[in-house]
Image: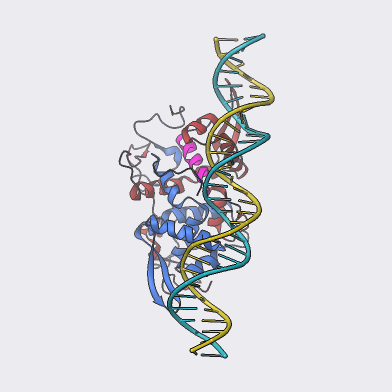
Chain colours: A red, B blue, C yellow, D cyan
Amino acid sequence: MARKRFDDSNCSVARALNQVGDWWSLLIVLHAMYGTRRFVDFQQELGIAKNILCDRLARLVENGVLKKVDVGEHGSRFEYRLTEKGRDLFPVVIALRQWGDKWNPAPDEVPLDLRDKATGQPIQPVQVQNAKGEPITVRDVFVPGEPVPGSKKRPA
Amino acid sequence: MARKRFDDSNCSVARALNQVGDWWSLLIVLHAMYGTRRFVDFQQELGIAKNILCDRLARLVENGVLKKVDVGEHGSRFEYRLTEKGRDLFPVVIALRQWGDKWNPAPDEVPLDLRDKATGQPIQPVQVQNAKGEPITVRDVFVPGEPVPGSKKRPA
DNA sequence: CAAATTTGGTTTCTTAACGCAACTCTATTT
DNA sequence: AAATAGAGTTGCGTTAAGAAACCAAATTTG
């Protein structure tokens, strides 16, 4: 996070970025979705400094993305698990993953083969869809009440 | 951006975050999707410092998300427009927007009413879908070749 | 034509965040 | 009882973010 806070911004994207918009938070959420739950595992998998990890986990818990669960088990006492709010970031993370795979592919990396447990089939690319379920782009949409974007510059 | 670079990370999410994962970049892309193109407009709409805006625009151009177009027009010489790569962030931005609207609603803000130009109908929530087009959650997927996430901790 | 403005950008300087390493504290294993 | 692991905290140096001032070219204004 930077110094500029957007908690009170009137833009929900800005507020969302305020919660998960820094370097590490989304990666933590990503790994949490992959099944990581414990402090040391996050630390080793991400290669993140411990104090930063502390800070990010605390903030994610504070924002309701993760919950801290006390598990009194063989030396490991806490687990960080996704809340519903956190799990709801699934489309965001997957969309970002697919974007990265498409536009910045690594030669030595397979482009994420996520599959449906029920069917074993690969998932579809995340896309924005209209009411009929057809994929649409940024050029196909408008915000009612505003001049159509692209035709003319917005007043402010 | 922070000091730790992920250009060479073997995770495409990390690499994606390397390009648009800081505070401002995604907001710039968002506003570009709303139709903003000129330096001063970005600056005023976002309330961003000019040097940071310079830096972010340059980086986004460098990464192929925006392109800088010289338009010799009444004192404004450049426009920053989305490339296809940039427009392809549409699902990411919308998913993030919808997540923010859902989980951090602002009392005085309407939760984004994006509509299809063709039909005038609102768009659907961005979701991850299986091969049949059914929405699925993080719990419904697995990565082939790995132990099923959630059942047991991954080796690394 | 000269002065003020606009646009896009650079420089300077302060402040805050990042990252490493070392240290702490509790619980567990040996 | 000593050693180890998990989960942090503290200190400190490095680096990036941010505000504000300054710059230069083109444009508008008077």
Is B96 situated above or below A72? Answer: below
Along the viewing direction, whichever of A83 and C26 lies nearer the viewer: C26
Q: Residue at x 62, y 43 (%)?
A: A62
- A118 relative position to C10: left or right: left
Find residue C5 and report its horizontal and vertical position in percent: 55, 79
Foreground residue among B21 and A139: B21
Q: Is residue A25 magenta?
A: yes
Q: Residue at x 50, y 54 (%)?
A: B98
Residue B150 in magenta stretch: no
Please provide the residue range marked out in magenta: A22-36
Q: Residue at x 44, y 53 (%)?
A: B92
Q: Could you tell me residue B152's position as x and y percent?
A: 46, 27
Q: Position of residue B138 (x, y in %)?
A: 45, 40
User: Mainly helix, strand or loop, the magenta region?
Assistant: helix
Give residue A57's position: percent from left, percent from top.
Answer: 58, 39
Question: In this picture, is A48 found above or below B131?
Answer: above
Above or below, A122 against A73 in this view is below
**In the picture provided, is B67 more to the left or to the right than A92?**
left
Q: Nearer the viewer, residue B92 or B107?
A: B92
